[in-house]
Image: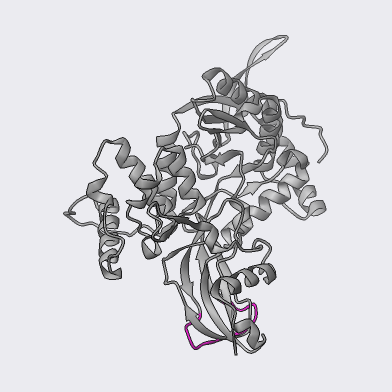
Amino acid sequence: MATVDLVMPKLGESIMEATILKWHKQPGDPVKMDETLLDIATDKVDSEVPSTAAGVVDEILYNVNDVVPIGAVIARIRTSAQSSADSQQSPVDSLQSTVRSQQPVSSHTQDAVVVDSYRTPKSNGSSSRFYSPLVLNIAASEGVNMSELENLQGTGNEGRVTKKDILQYVSRKRQGQSSTQTTQVSREQSPAVRESTNDQQTQSNYQVGSYTGNVEIIEMDRMRKLIAEHMVRSKQTSPHVTSFTEADVTNLVMWREKVKKDFEKREGTKITFTPLFIEAVVRCIKKFPLVNCSLDGDKIIVKKDINIGMATALPSGNLIVPVIRNADQLNLVGLAKQVNNLADNARNGKLRADDTQGGTFTMTNVGTFGSLMGTPIINQPQVAILAVGAIKKRPVVIETPHGDSIAIRHMMYLSMSYDHRIVDGSLGATFLTAVAKELENFRSDREF
């Protein structure tokens, strides 16, 4: 009998860790090749991890809710499919050979990274501790030295420092609080003591006091906690400014109404307003590329790729932002198919981890829920987000060569929040006005 190591697969660019949601098998259970062994979650996407071998589950190394670095061994499977020589390999050699030989288990699962690459030596050289690249990047950008990291209590598996830990530490440090009161805890604590400490921290984060009267207490689910953390961090990172304008989209509305049946019949997908809005946004980004960037300290990173994130509501009420990559290279039909496919996959829980990565600009349609306008929060690390409101018929003044007149038109408000560190009011307002003009100048005789 030989043993095969199952590692946490790579789930997408920049994803360095994942949370275990559920084990479908327990030690002693038989498992088939490609049979789902566990469910995992990244920041927003849940995924299934299939077995890379057929055999019997020998050992499970992590528990539910543990945060595991990419490339870490999470389970071992006994199998007779390998030679006994393979089973005599050292743990590191076994992991490395498994990583090299493992084929992708899905379209977004690629060669894994050896877990030792996430291990950083302690300053005294006596032992080592896991630090994900994400944690190290945050520490470097916030001026947290290695000595502080070594004294920082981690809430992850075996006391590992997670993204949440480092962000909380930076927040306390900014507020001038003594880090020694909350961070210098012996790493040799027993699991029971660590679990008690983690529970206390969780309660302090989400419990604000006692409750009186007729109330119902609802625990945030994992996604809602992540959304809350992301929104708070965005507000703390970027000085938000929001500009507003309105657009007469009568030509666009009438054109869509005229072609929607033929469009669906010919292309096999519906034409909604979203791809029409995205088309206008992409054209304006080409004219004003500075809204398609991010900041790295005092460096402005202008993105040459135009990857549009579209905020999508899930049946649970939570929000997710799948990304249309290289939107500038797609025509209207291509945009419509991408929008509909991503929206369907989001609602059915079929999004891949890569589907939510790499966005450079985000658009949210608050009009879907009847809102006239909104003040959206920037999707970090982007610097701008556009909100389109509900389209309403209103009487407006029309200027003609023969004088002014009043007509019933389809009107829509647009609003854009932007990072005032890089996007000034003049650029933000000019870009937003340009998008409105693109929509107003929509050709009603165009082909699709």
In reply to whether residue 207 is colored magenta, the answer given is: no
Image quadrant for the C terminus?
top right
In this picture, which residue range is highlighted in magenta?
25-36
Farthest residue to the front: give it.
125
Relative image position of residue 146 (x, y in whole percent)? 40, 46
Q: Residue at x 65, y 71 (%)?
A: 97
Quadrant location of residue 435? top right
Query: Residue at 56% across / 46% down in the picture?
Result: 311
Q: Nearer the viewer, residue 90 or 162?
A: 90
Residue 98: image x %, image y %? Answer: 63, 72
Q: Is residue 406 visible in this depiction of the protein?
A: yes
Q: Is residue 61 left or right of residue 111?
A: left
Seen at 42% across and 41% down, the residue is 233
How many numbered marks have been drawn onto this rendered protein structure? 0
Residue 29 located within the stretch drawn in magenta: yes
Give the residue drawn at x 76%, y 49%: 261
From the top left corner, tell me how far across and down residue 436 is, in percent.
Answer: 63, 26
Taking the image as shown, residue 258 lies to the left or right of residue 209, namely: right
Q: Quadrant of residue 107?
A: bottom right
Q: Dividing the image into 4 quarters, which one contains the N terminus?
A: bottom right
Who is closer to the viewer here, 157 or 363?
157
Is the magenta region chiefly helix, strand or loop? Answer: loop
x and y, in percent, of residue 353 in the image: 59, 57
